[in-house]
Image: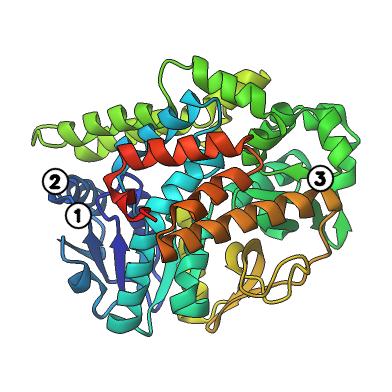
Amino acid sequence: MRLAILGGGGFRVPLVYGALLGDRGPGRVTRVVLHDVDAGRLRAISRVLGEQAAGVADAPEVVATTDLDEALRGADFVFSAIRVGGLEGRANDERVALAEGVLGQETVGAGGIAYGLRTVPVAVDIARRVARLAPDAWVINFTNPAGLVTEAMSRHLGDRVIGICDSPVGLGRRIARVLGAKPDEAWIDYVGLNHLGWVRGLRVAGRDQLPRLLADPALLGSFEEGRLFGADWLRSLGAIPNEYLHYYYFNREAVQAYREAEKTRGAFLRDQQESFYAGTADPAVSALELWDRTRAEREATYMSENREAAGAGEREADDLSGGYEKVALALMRAIARDERATLILDVRNRGTLSALDDDAVIEVPCLVDANGAHPVSADPLPGHAVGLVCAVKAVEREVMEAVRSGSRATAVKAFALHPLVDSVSVARRLVDAYTAVHPGLAYLGR
């Protein structure tokens, strides 16, 4: 099979390739085509992959191209992992938002909206090209904001685009671990939107073990989300939220922590990755070792401001090894080989959550087979979750409409309706500031 990776010069691509190296079953990927708009980044990542493949028999062939159409032709699967505007764009998203006293995180709040306004037009163009050049291909979307981007692409690709995220998988794994259960043998009742979901139950042999966790302060304090949110709040919710809900439940603390940080997350990653890519230009340096050291630092500092604000301590070693590449490989295997699997994915609702329409992309457990991903029926969300999910989905829809129409007023509406933007006046200033720093938003002229 042929796999095209869009954003193939991106830092996390070696995680995907490493997973492919361990896949020895029938229907395995034999050719990987990396696409990126930056030839230098492609050279750097190609060096890393070359070192990964050294001594591995029948390692998938790797080719690189800056021609998008060339990358897509003949693809069986397309991984979309693009970053429109690069990490400089992310740093600007954060800086503009924090100047207004609101959150600039790349998928949540003002930063997520700005990133979506830049990314959706490019993602839609990719979807149209896939439909024309590789109509039988399955698109697996890694690009953030993952739920929004997947829904925008689904309007052109239908159910042949599936979004993935490692946050629900990591959360389920941590809960299972503290309960003494094997993650592969547990059913995780997870429901919501991307970066906006809750674990409402964890069933082992048909019995829900989550009440036991919620009733035990020691167990709740033994894993990341328990320390991040606090035992009392988790018991009040009767569920374990995705870590990104910390931005909603403790917004003031999160914004303050980000304003006091030496660098925003985007600026940190920008500087870190610039150093990595520059380092790979030295042929005497092992690109793979440099990548591995950089990755370890990246993972260890993930959401560090939130953990510091909550006094949650450092990340645990088991959570530093990545994860989304494993979800992607399992998804690809299930489709290509009809190896049925249950995975938490971003897919069209199709009646799963009554509060949303059928075309809304949600994040829920899915049964996956050769025909794609099929969301599993879910109990209704509690009232507090319905309100938040519906509000954020409405914002996503306004972002898509702003992209379609080029309407500045609709972009303002998207910002103003978000629960973490507290003023229409702030929303107007945000649109002005973002269009000033991002030339790609010049389409918002009406």
| Residues at marks 2 and 1, CA–CA distance in whole angstroms | 9 Å
| Residues at marks 3 and 2, CA–CA distance in whole angstroms | 45 Å
Up-down: is 296 above or below 365?
above
Q: Amino acid at mark 1?
A: Val
| Residue identified by numbered label 2 | 40
**Quarter where residue 373 is shown:** bottom right
Picture coordinates of residue 162 (x, y %)? 51, 68
Residue occupying the point 42% across, 55% down: 143
Q: Amino acid at mark 3?
A: Ala
Up-down: is 296 above or below 181?
above
Give the quadrant of the N terminus: bottom left
N-term mark: 1 or 3: 1
Residue occupying the point 23% across, 60% down: 35
Residue occupying the point 37% across, 51% down: 118
Q: Amino acid at mark 2?
A: Gly
| Residue identified by numbered label 3 | 239
Tag shown at residue 37: 1
